[in-house]
Amino acid sequence: MKKIVVLTGAGISAESGIKTFRDSDGLWENYRVEDVATPEAWENNYELVLNFYNERLQQLDKAFPNDGHNYLTKLESHYEVQIITQNVDDLHEKAGSSNVLHLHGELRKKRSQVNPDYILEIDKTENQIKKGDLCPWGQQMRPHIVWFGEAVPLIEEAAKLVEQADIFIIIGTSMAVYPAAGLIYYVKPGIPIYYIDPKANETPNVSKNTIRIAEKASIGVAQLVNELLEKAKNAN
Ligand code: NAD
């Protein structure tokens, strides 16, 4: 089976009602990113940060995968599929994708500030990280999110996966957030690269031979998945 590696960004979840922030005048759900998604924000006002992520978590319960997420699962019938997502939502999992690596963390998890390996699922009935929820080292638990300005611990694992790709697909990302955007440089020479984003034709940070599909995820992914499934069936 050929291996498809898919890099997704906030755009794939836009049609599920979860906003990207690059498309909303630099604000993310009405907050300045600097106030809620940086280590400094946590340092200055951790209650605001907790409230922001608790709101995002509760929003997730009302969000459902769209055709972008759903069509990707269909590829698994004829390809080995690895998704690398920059998203902190769980819509790939809800759609049924088998292999999902979350580069920037997960809304449904919390972790210790002292020991980054102490990571817990957030209790479903509470559905929030409470003020006073302490780790075994006596510190407030934080969202399991990679904030702007923090290292991305899974980037090397992601780069290794990209090196193994026979086909690479990028969906709904501006290719402006590093180091995630740099994963394209790990694609082996000669491997087809597809880029689905309404602004695909305006983005400079993709290689010259990238096949650009300037469509919303729901349309562009359905189109490409049908094409790749046809190819796989004809090859058998
Ligand atoms: P981003 O820089 O990847 O930009 C969003 C991209 O989505 C843009 O290129 C835009 O053209 C595209 N887009 C908009 N509507 C689309 C659609 N219907 N179909 C396909 N593409 C579409 O992402 P960002 O919003 O700047 O966020 C940066 C980081 O913030 C993310 O990497 C993530 O860590 C976090 N974030 C996560 C979520 C989520 O989990 N759903 C949402 C917002 C932000």
Image (cartoon, rainbow, N blue to C red):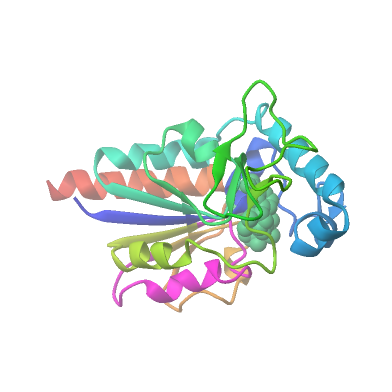
* Residue sitting at x 59%, y 59%: 173
Say if the magenta span includes residue 186.
Answer: yes
Q: Indicate the position of residue 171 as horizontal and vertical percent values.
A: 52, 55
In x, y percent, where is residue 133? 73, 37
**Which residue occupies 45% across, 79% down?**
208
Q: Is residue 96 left or right of residue 135?
A: left
Tell whether position 182 is magenta. Answer: yes
Q: Nearer the viewer, residue 36 or 203?
A: 36
159 is higher (above) or lower (below) than 205: above
Residue at the front extreme, as displayed: 137
Residue pictured at 79% horizontal, 56% vertical: 42
Q: Is residue 82 visible?
A: yes
Above or below 236: residue 125: above
In the rendered image, residue 2, in percent from the top left (x then y), is placed at: 22, 54
**Residue lying at 49% horizontally and 40% vertically, measured from the top left:** 92
Residue 21, picture quadrant: bottom right
Rendering quarter of residue 181: bottom right
Label total for image: 0
- Residue 207 percent location from the top left of the image: 46, 77
Q: Is residue 23 left or right of residue 48?
A: left
In this picture, residue 121 sits left or right of residue 236: right
- Give 191 or 124, whichever is nearer the viewer: 124
What secondary structure is the stretch in magenta mostly built from? loop
Q: Quadrant of ligand 1?
A: bottom right
Q: Which residues are magenta?
A: 171-193
Viewer-side residue, 75 vs 223: 75
